[in-house]
Structures are given as C-alpha cells and as structure tokens.
Amino acid sequence: MWIIGFLFLLTPSTVLGLECYVCDNQDSNYDKCTKTIKTCDIAEDRCLSEVRWGSTPYWDSTGKKQFYISKTCSTERQCKSEISKVSSRCDRIWYNDWECVECCHGDRCNYFVTLAGVNVKPHGIFYILVSLAWLFILKKVL
C-alpha cells in the first residue's frame, strides 16, 4: 500500500493536471509571466507561449515598438492551429510587426520564451550551404 502512495507522490502532474505560467499581453517575460501559475484543465496537455512585436498601444512619434507576451494552457490541436495561423508572420525582423507561437510539454515548461528556433532552421541550412560553397571554391582555387 505504501508503494502506491509513494508512486502517487511521484506523479503529481498526471494526477493534478499540468501547470503552466499564464499572462496576457505583458511587455516582458518577468513579473506576471513568470509568477502566475495555472493548473490546466485535464484536456489541456501543453503550455502555449505567444510573442508579438509591434507598435505601442499609444501614439509615439518615433514609431516605438515593444514585445507583447502571452502564456496559457492549451491542447495539442489548439497549439498546431495557433502555430499554423501565425507561421507566415513569424519572421522576427525588427522593423516588422511579427508574432510567433510555441508549445511545450511538462509542468511550467513555458517559463522562458525561447521560440524553439522557429526560424533558425532555414538560416542554419543557409549557413551550411554557404560553407559548402566556400569549401568547393577553395578546393578549386587551391
């Protein structure tokens, strides 16, 4: 009997539900976005983070932009839908308004907003191709 009790203590997220950090349209990943925790509904098995970069909510003659960070609980289906919805706008170019979404598994996995290298893969391939081209050119020259 004590073994069952011990196993119960080892699996709190399965029994009690996933925990995610939650916040809405915060201008940084501090304070509310790292201090507010929610126990998700049973069907919600992911933590979703959205990062937007855009104009301030007030008029600014300099065209100042800022981050807007939102975090919540989600389902796999909602995550895929949100990622698909914003994928064409997730370019992270400083002068554009952009937004990116990422999802993760595990209790409080959305503490950091990493964006999981959403657009790093094409750039990585680019650098590999350039490196290979340089090697090919150097081989021909030498």
Image: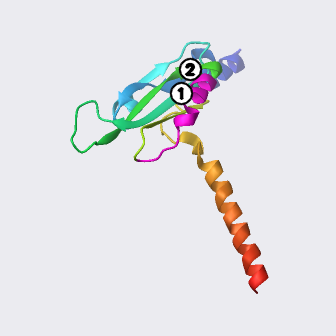
Tell me the colour scheme of the image.
Answer: rainbow
- Whether 76 is among the magenta residues is no
Q: Earlier in the sequence, mark 2 or mark 1?
A: 1
Percent coordinates x, y for residue 128 in the rendering: 69, 61
Q: Is residue 95 left or right of residue 74?
A: left
The quarter of the picture where residue 141 lies is: bottom right
Q: Amino acid at mark 1?
A: Leu
The quadrant of the image that shows the N terminus is top right
What's the residue at 61%, 28% (across, down)?
84
**Residue depicted at 48% across the width and 31% down the height:** 50
Estimate the x, y position of residue 83 in percent, counting from the top left: 59, 29
Vertical placement of 32 versus 90: above or below? above
Between the residue at mark 2 and the residue at mark 1, the CA separation in whole angstroms equals: 6 Å
Q: What residue did someone put label 1 on?
A: 48
| Picture layout, residue 55 above or below residue 127 | above
Q: Looking at the image, do the residues carrying marks 2 and 1 touch, with CB atoms under 8 Å apart? A: yes
- Residue range in magenta is 79-94
Q: Quadrant of the C terminus?
A: bottom right
**7, 96: nearer the viewer:** 96
Amino acid type, callout 2: Ser
Q: Which residue is mark 2?
A: 74
